[in-house]
Each structure stands twice: as C-alpha cells, then as structure tokens.
Amino acid sequence: MYSIMIESLASYVSFLSYRYLAYTTNLKSMLSQLKSFSLLFALVLGPAFLGMVLLLFLGLGKIVDSHAEPASGAKLAVVYLLLESVMLWAMASAIKNSQNRAFQRSLYKSSWRVSADCKLLLLSNAWLIASLLIAVELSLKQWLQVPHFMLFMLLQWLCGVFVLYRPRALFYSLLLSSVLVLQPVSLSPLQYYLGFVAIFGCSILLPPVRISHKLKVHSLALFWLSYFLQHSWCLIWRGSVLVACLFSLLQLITIRSDFSDLIQAVAFSVCVLLTSSLQFDCLAVFKKYRLFFQSNSQDKPFYISQFLPSLIFFAVALIVVISMLGINLIYIPIGAVWCVLQQYLAQKKPAQFALVWFFITIGIVLLA
C-alpha cells in the first residue's frame, strides 16, 4: 500500500514538473511574440516599474481603508478585477497548457489537472499575491474592521477560476459589478463586496448567449460580425483595459483637476493604442481567409474591410472617453488620422508600431 502511495506521489510530482515546464515554455513563447513592443516596454515600463508596484499597493490600501468613501473603493476594486482578469486571460493558455489538454486527460486524473491549474493560477496572479502580502500584515483587530477585504481576495481568486473555466460567467460578473458601482446608492464596503460575491455566484447560472451560429454570412460585414462574436475576447480585454484606465484617470482628475488637459491627452493616446492594435488581429484574419475571398473575386473589398473594425472600435472608444472625461474636439480628427497611421504601421511595419505611438504620445502630452 505504501509503495502504491509513493508511486502515486512520484507520478504527481512528475506531472507538476511537466506542467511547470510547459508553463514557463509557453510564457517564453508569448514574450517572444512581443518583440515589436520591446522598445516601448523598455522606454515606458522599465523606469516606471517601481512606480507601478507602488500604485498597486496604494490602490489596495485604498480598497482596504474605504470606509470614508465606500463607492470609490468599490469602483477601484472593480478596476483591479478587470485588469487582473485581462492579465490572467492572456496567461490562461499557459496556465492550463491548453495545447496538450487532451493528452493530459488521457493520462492523468482530473483532480491532478485542477490541482496543477490552481497552483499555476496562484503563481500567475500577482494581484492576489499583493493582496496576500497586505493581508498577512493585518492584525486580528484590523481584520475585524475590514472584513470586506477578505471578500475582495475571494473575488480575486474567483476571477482567476472563471478565466480558466467560466469566461462567459466572468464577463457577466464584471459587467453587472460595474453596473452596481455606478448606481447612485449609498452602501457600506461590506455590502458592496457581498453584492459582488452574489453577482459572481449568480452569473454561473446565467445561460450562454450564442448568436454567431445563427448568423448566415453572406456579406463582409456579417463575416466580421461573426468573427468578433466568436472571438469576442480580443474586444473585451481592450475594452476592459480602456475602462479601467479611464476610471483611474477619472479619479486622478478629481485629485488634480489642474492636470485635466494632460490626463485627457493620456486617455486619448491610450484609446488610439488599444483600438489601432486591433489591426494585428484583423491582419491575421485577412491572411487566413485571403485565398477564399480571392477565389470569390472579393479580394479587394476584403482587403479594405480589414481596416474598418479598428476604426469603428476607435469611434466607439472615443465616445466613451468623451462621455467619461470630456475631451478637446480637436482630438477627434487628430485621432482618426493617428489611428489610420497606426493601422498602416501594424500592416506594413509592425516593429515600429509601438515606437511611433510612443513619440506621438510624448508630443501630444507636451502640447497639452
């Protein structure tokens, strides 16, 4: 009996080693695909790394101590959950080792797979790790004063689990949570987070909405609509990052209203970056289906149509930016030209996409 247990334990450890190796290999592959953004990361994120870590902990501190402004703390919590979900979604394939999932099912127990998923999920969730670091510093008396922070950490964990196993439920949860924090009601921090937990729990019961399989694709517009319905995450993560950024900048404007022009310029540049980067996805679709449309004598219309999703997304995003922050109207024509320029770079010179965006952003910020 002991030999069987030892053999089973050895097999489990071997499986964990395999999963960790696959995880690190996938992450290296993902990082190698970001070479066109390496200069941007070096210029912007390198010097600002410590500042970003500091802002992360400052935000968590505001979530912990949100009794004075519970609505503001709840909004910040939703922003954190949005950003955390986007980051984990980008890493979900590496965490689950999706490429070899069928192979794992044929050899290993389902409990082993789930256990490995959870371990790698915790390892990947820097947001939850930061919360745990704060949690261990709290005394029992402080814990009794901030019980909502325990619920927030539960929500952080649920976000990761939903990313891996219930992505549609995560979308519903974050959408309904955003609606809750925008309501003009006065709730305590604990009530807000209990509401979030209830929303996350009920979202599992909501039925999936499938529209794409009902569409009859007989035009290019319906083709792109069908594609984005089936690959909605490429829009959702960009929209989530934009909304999270706007919420953060909105809070910053309330603190430093004298910097409103500068903050609007930053929001505008982020809007252009997120929307124009959609061209990378559209270009991949164009390359995949080019021969099919060429065989139907629709190669030129299809080539032109690949630029429209980014422009439409930019128009919608700009409306959101204007409605939340307000913006100088001169940015609208500038943004349209800038978005087209970034699309061209994504199409022809992807290595220069981030660099051009960075220098134009610097110019606009200096002129703001």
Image (cartoon, rainbow, N blue to C red):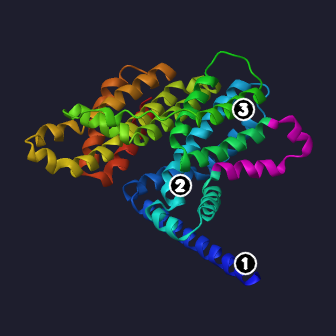
Task: State the SS at label 1.
Answer: helix
Q: Which mark is residue 218?
A: none
State the separation of the CA atoms marked 2 and 3. Answer: 34 Å
The x and y percentages for residue 36 are 36, 55
Looking at the image, can residue 338 be seen?
no
Q: Earlier in the sequence, mark 3 or mark 1?
A: 1
Q: Is residue 137 above or below residue 238?
A: below
Per the model, the C-alpha gap separating discs 1 and 2 is 48 Å
**Mark 1: few/some/many CA within 10 Å (<14, 14-19, 20+):** few
- Which residue is at the far front? 1
Q: Which mark is residue 5?
A: 1
Secondary structure under badge 2? helix
On the image, the x and y values in percent for residue 93 come to: 48, 57
Q: Dividing the image into 4 quarters, which one contains the C terminus? A: top left
Q: Callout 2 environment at 10 Å: few (<14), some (14 to 19), or many (20+)?
A: few
Nearer to us of marks 1 and 2 is 1
